[in-house]
Image: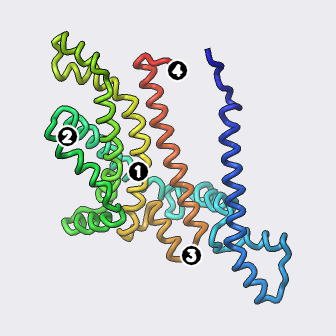
Amino acid sequence: MAPARTGSGATLPVLVVVCAIVALWYGLAVVLNAPWARDQAARDGVALGPAALVAATLTQERPRLPAPDQVVAELWKSTIEVAPTSKRSLIYHAWITLSATLLGFGLGAALGILLAVGIVHDRTMDASVMPWVIASQTIPILAIAPMIIVVLNSVGVSGLLPKALISMYLSFFPVAVGMVKGFRCPDRVLLDQMSTWNASRAQLFWRLRWPAAVPYLFASLKVAVAAALVGAIIGEMPTGAVAGLGARMLSGSYYGQTVQIWSALLMAALLAAGLVAVIDLAERITARAMGARP
C-alpha cells in the first residue's frame, strides 16, 4: 500500500513554483521599468546606483509591469478598504462577471451534454454535427463577440444574456468532446453483456454509459468553467460596459492604470481557481456517493 502524502509534501512543490514565479515577476518588473526610471533620473540630473534603480522600478505609479506587492496592495485596497457594493470594489465587478459566467457555463454544459448524447446515439449527428462542433472553435472569439453583442442589441437584448451566450460558446465545446469520449469509453464486453440482458437504450445509457462518463464530465467541466469566465470577460469589453472585470481592465487600459489592470487579472485568476475548486469538491462528493475509493 502506497504511503499517503502528507500536507507538507503536497504543499512544498506548490510553494516552490509560486516563489519562482514571484521572483521571475520581480525580475521582469525591474527590467521592463528600468528605462523609464533611468530617463527620469537623467532629467533630474541624478545618477542611479543598482539599489536605487531597483527601488525606482518597483515603486512607479504607472509601471509597464507592476511589481507583485503593488498588485496585492491594489487588490487589498479595492476589496477590503471599500464597500463590496461600491463601483470601486473588485468584489462588485467580480460578482457582475461571475453572474454571466455561471449562466453561460450552465447553458454551455447543458448544450455540450445534449450534443454528446445525440452524437453517441445517432450516426448522422456523429458524421454531421461533430465536425461543426470542432470547426466552431476555430473562429476567434474576439472576432465574433462584437457581432453577437451588436446583433442582440439590435433586437433589444442586452445586459447579462449576451455575455452569457459568449461564455456558452466557449464552454460547450470541452463538455461536448469530453462527454462523447466518456459515453464511448465502456468496454465492448460490457455493452454486449447489457445487450444479452435485453437492456433498453435508456437502461444502457443510465446504468452503463452515464456512470462511466462521470469522470470525463467533471474533467471537462473544470476546463469549461475557466473558458466561461474568459468568455464573460471578453463579452464585457466591446459593450462599453461600466461594470465587470473586463470593464475594469478596459478602463485601466484607457487611463494607463496598469496596476488596476493587473489587480483585475489577479481577481479573475482567483475567481477561476475558486470555481474549479467548487467543481473539484463536487467531483469528490459524487465519487464518494458512487462508491469510489478515496
Left or right, 195 with respect to 43, comes to left
Residue 127, how many percent across, how many down? 18, 43
57 w.r.t. 75: above or below: below
Type of amino acid at the residue the image marks with label 1 = Ala
C-alpha gap between disc 2 and disc 1: 24 Å
Q: Amino acid at mark 3?
A: Gly
Image spot of residue 241 (x, y percent): 39, 67
Residue 37 is tagged as: none
Label ID, residue 126: 2
- Which residue lies under the disc numbered 4? 294
Near mark 3 (Cα within 10 A), the count class, few <14, some 14-19 or many ≥20, is some
Q: Dividing the picture into quarters, in which one does residue 3 lie?
A: top right
Q: Could you tell which of marks 1 and 4 lies nearer the N-terminus? A: 1
Labels 2 and 1 touching (C-beta < 8 A): no
The residue drawn where x is 72% and y is 56% is 23
- Looking at marks 4 and 2 on the same chain, the residue that comes earlier in the sequence is marked by 2
Tag 2: amino acid: Asp
User: Seen in the image, is 52 located left or right of residue 62?
Assistant: right
Residue 256's disc number: 3
The residue lying toward the viewer, choosing from 272 and 78, is 272
Query: What is the distance, in whole Å, between disc 3 and disc 4 at their CAs?
Result: 49 Å
- Tell me if I can see residue 167 in this picture: yes
Looking at the image, which residue is at 29% across and 29% down? 184
Q: How many angstroms separate mark 2 from mark 3 (CA)?
A: 49 Å
- Of all residues shown, which one is farthest toward the top? 197
In the image, residue 281 sits, relative to residue 69, either above or below, namely: above
Q: Tell which circle, 2 or 1, labels the residue nearer the N-terminal end.
A: 2
Label 1: few (<14), some or many (≥20) within 10 Å?
Answer: many
- What residue do we see at 42% from left, 25% from top? 286
Write down the residue under mark 1: 227
Give the number of the mark in front: 3 or 1. Answer: 1
Say which element carries label 4: loop
